[in-house]
């Protein structure tokens, strides 16, 4: 019974690795192609593919690291650890890009301004 369980864990880890190496890039490609503007029209038809790619791109390595580490499979732990590091790097780049392209703050005073002829509109004032 222990041998069949060992084989099932190895098969699950191999399936997760193939999913991360094949399925995730395929979903990214599908999402990119579906989001391409055709004849000047803008579409977000591929966003579902990209969301699935993001979840699987981070989830498969995370699950793989946990399973490989708890079953003491050193090679698989290294593989999924590197995959998880790459997924975290891609996420960090995306967050940095979102922060860099943040819209500017709205114009106008950013402090309390008293108006002539009336009271002020300051909170608590």
Image (tube, grey):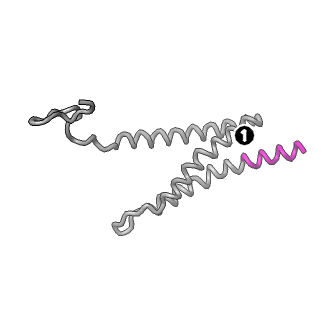
Is residue 80 shown above or below 45? above
Question: On the image, which quarter does residue 71 sit in?
Answer: top right
* Residue 35 drawn at (x, y percent): 44, 61
Identify the element where label 1 is drawn: helix
Left or right placement of residue 2 versus residue 12 in this view: right
Residue furthest toward the right? Answer: 1
Is residue 67 shown above or below 37? above
Left or right placement of residue 71 versus residue 25 in this view: right
- The N terminus - image quarter: top right
Q: Nearer the viewer, residue 22 or 37?
A: 37
At 26% from the left and 33% from the top, the residue drawn is 123
Q: Residues within 10 Å of mark 1 (few under 14, many from 20)?
A: some
Question: On the image, which quarter does residue 94 sit in?
Answer: top left
Q: Nearer the viewer, residue 111 or 19?
A: 111
Q: Which residues are magenta?
A: 1-13
Left or right placement of residue 4 versus residue 67 in this view: right
Q: How many discs mark residues in the rendered view?
A: 1
Q: Is 8 a magenta residue?
A: yes
Residue furthest toward the left? Answer: 117
At 67% from the left and 42% from the top, the residue drawn is 63
At 58% from the left and 44% from the top, the residue drawn is 58
Q: Main secondary structure of the magenta part?
A: helix
Residue bearing the label numbered 1: 67
- The C terminus - image quarter: top left
Left or right placement of residue 25 versus residue 109 in this view: right
Q: Nearer the viewer, residue 72 or 119?
A: 119
């Amino acid at each position: 019974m222990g041998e069949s369980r060992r084989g099932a864990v190895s098969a699950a880890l191999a399936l997760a690795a193939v999913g991360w190496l094949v399925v995730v890039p395929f979903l990214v490609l599908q999402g990119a192609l579906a989001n391409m503007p055709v004849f000047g029209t803008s579409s977000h038809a591929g966003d579902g593919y990209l969301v699935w790619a993001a979840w699987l791109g981070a989830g498969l390595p995370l699950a793989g690291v946990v399973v490989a580490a708890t079953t003491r499979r050193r090679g698989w732990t290294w593989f999924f650890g590197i995959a998880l590091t790459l997924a975290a790097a891609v996420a960090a780049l995306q967050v940095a890009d979102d922060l860099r392209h943040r819209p500017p703050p709205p114009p106008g005073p950013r402090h309390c301004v008293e108006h002539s002829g009336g009271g002020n509109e300051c909170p608590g004032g």
